[in-house]
Amino acid sequence: MATDDETIDEELEEAEAAERSDRIEFRGGKWMSAFPIAFFILWAIVQSGLLRIGDTTGLVAGMLIALIIGMLFAKGSWKAYANTIFEGMTRRVAATAVVAWLWAGMFAATIQTGGFVGGLVWAATVLEIGAALFPAITFILAALLATGIGTGYGTTVAFTTLFFPAGVLLGANPVLLFGAILSGAVFGDNLAPVSDTTIVSAVTQDSDIGGVVASRFKYAIVAAVIAFAAYVVAGNAMSGVDVAGQFREVFVANSEPGGLLHLLSIFVVIATAVSGRHIVEAISWGIIVAFLINVVFGLASFSDMVVFNAPRDAAVAQSLSFLPFVELVGTEEVGVGGSLYSGAEGFFPLIVLTLLIVAGAQIMIRGGGFAALQDWLLDSVATSVRRAETSMVLGTAIVNAMITINTAAEIAIAPYIARLGERFNINGYRRANILDANTSALGYIFPWSGGVLVGFAAMQGLPNQYDWFTRSMIVNPAEVWPFVFHGWLLVTVFLVAALTGFGREYTSDREVKEVARV
Amino acid sequence: MSFLDRYLGGGAFRTTLDKYLTGWSFRTTHPSFEVGEEISVFVTGYENGTAVVRVGDTVIRVPDAPDGLLDRRVRVRVTDFAENDHVGEAEYLETVGESAF
C-alpha cells in the first residue's frame, strides 16, 4: 500500500536525519544525557544490591522507565530522542550479542539435558576423593561444567544441589566447598566461549570470540593453578561437620558416565571458535554434535531437545504423533518445548535489557555526556597507559561490585573500556580480558552478588531433600567471600597485569579479527 | 616441516596454538618502532592541528594525516623514531576502521 510505504520512507528519512544531526540538547546541560544510564544503574543497585531481587526483567522495567523520564529532559522535538533509541538498538554490538546468546543458550541446555552434570558426578565417584581433596576437585569439575555451558549461575545451582551435599557428607568444610563451587563458576564465566559475559566482552571491544578466549587463557590458568593449590591446603586445614549419612546415596542416583561424552561437544565449540571460525558456526557445530551424541547414546531423546506438545483431542496431532518430536498432552500443557527451546528462551530478558541499555548509551553519546565523562577520565585519571589499565580494572570492579547482575554491569561500562583503551592503542583482546575478569569474578564473591544468591537459594531446598541435612549446614552468604579463591586471584592477576604489563598487547602488535559478519 | 606441523595437523594447529601462547610476557609501557614499519593504530588526538597516535606512552605524530580522524583506525608508515624519547613521526597511508563505540 502506497500510504504505508510513504510512512516507512518518512520514518527512515527522519532516522537518517537524526543520525546526521548528532546532538540532542538537554535541559540542565550535557550531563543530563547520562540520566537514563545513571537512573538505570541506581535502579539496579537498589533492586539487586539492596533488595536482593535478581530479576532481569525487573531491570528491563527500570531501563524503560529511565528512557521515558530521560525524554522529559530533552529540549525541542522528542523525535530526535526517540530516533536515537532506535539508532542505539540497531547497533551491531547489540545484534551480535543477541545472536551469540541465542546459540549459546541452545548449546548449554542441550548438553545439560544430555546428562553432562551426571558425567561429572560419575567422575567424582570413580576418583574416590577424600574430604580434604574434595573442595579442590569440586573446583576443577565445576570449572569444567561452567566452561562447557557458559553459565556460572547454572553451574552454581547444579553443583550446590549435587556436589555440595555429597561433599558435606564426606566431611568437607561447607563454607570452603561453597567457595570452591563459586570459584569454578567464575572460571567458566570468564573463559567459556559460550558465556554471556565472554560474548559481551568480545563484541563490545570489536574482537573475535575465539581469539579472546585464547588470549584470556594465560590469566585464567595462572589464577586457577594457585586457586587449586589453595583449595588443597585449605581442604586439609579446615574441618567439616559430622553427619550420619552415606556419601554414595547422594551421588550414585545422579551418576551418568555417558554424560562425559559431552566433553567432545565442548571441545568442538572451543576448537572451532579458537581456530577462527565465526562463533555462530562454532556453536552450531557444538549443537549438532551434542544432539547426535544425545540421540545415538540414548542420553536424551529427540523430544527432550525439541518437541511439539499438541492437544490430545486435535485430529491432525493424533495422526502425526508417530513422529519423535510430536507428543500428545492435555490442554494445559500445550506448547513447544525441549532444550533448544528453553535454552534460547532463557536469554530473552537479557536480550531485551541489552537492547535498551545500548539505546541508553547512545543517548548519552548523542547528548555529549559520554564525551564529558571520557574527557574527565582521560585528563585526570588515565594519564598514562599504566594508569589507564589500572583504572579500567578498578572501574569494572566497582561497577560489578555494585550491580549484581554482572552482564548488565558489563554492558554499561564496556564503552568506557573501549574508548580509554583505544586512546592508548591497547589491543582489543587485552581490553576484552580486562573487562571480563572483574565482571566474572565479582559476580560471585559478595553476599549480594547474583552467583552467591543463586547458590544460597538452591541450598534452601536441601533440608527438604535429605533428612540428615540440617539448616545449620546452609552456608551464610556473608561467610563465603574470603573463600572464592579463583575470583580474588583473577582480580589480583589483572591488577598485577595492569601494573607490570603482563599480557599487555597494543593494537599495532597484532590484528584483532572482527567479531561478526552477521 | 616441523614435528608439530607433520603430526598435528600443520598450519591450522600451529596458528591455534600460537593464539594461546601470545602475550605471555611483560610488555613495556613505551613500545618502540622501526623506521619503515607499517602499523595499524587509532588516532588518539590532535596537537595544534597535527594528528597524534599514542601507543602506550609512546607518541607518534602524523603531520600529513587529514582532519577528523580522532578515534579512527589508520594505517601509517613510521618515518622517524627516537629510541630514547619514545617519540616518532609517521606518514599517513589510509583509514582502515573505526572505534568500537
Image: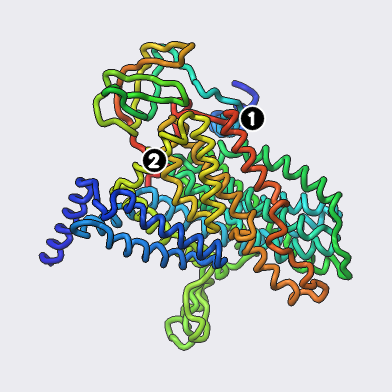
Question: Residue reaching furthest left?
Answer: A2
Secondary structure of the residue carrying tag 1 is helix
Which of the 4 quarters of the picture holds residue A65?
Answer: bottom left
Please say if B76 is above or below B22: above
Query: Is A492 placed left or right of B81 in the picture?
Result: right
Query: Is A279 placed left or right of A218 in the picture?
Result: left
Query: Marks 2/1: CA distance?
Result: 51 Å
| Chain under callout 2 | A
- Return the residue nearer the eye: A244 or A389: A389
Secondary structure of the residue carrying tag 2 is helix
- Return the residue nearer the eye: A223 or A300: A223
- The amino acid marked with disc number 2 is Gln
Query: Is A32 placed left or right of A419 in the picture?
Result: left
Q: Which residue is mark 1?
A: B7
Please say if A375 is above or below A280: above
Structural crowding at the residue carrying mark 1, measured as other residues with C-alpha within 10 Å and reported as few (<14), some (14–19) or many (≥20): few
Q: Position of residue A92 (x, y in %)?
A: 36, 48
Please say if A371 is above or below A457: above
- Residue at x-position 63% and y-position 38%: A493
Question: Residue reaching furthest bottom?
Answer: A313
- Return the residue nearer the eye: A420 or A181: A420
In this rendering, does residue B18 appear at all? no
Q: Which residue is mark 2?
A: A374
- The amino acid marked with disc number 1 is Tyr
- Residue at x-position 17% and y-position 60%: A8
In this rendering, does residue A235 appear at all? yes
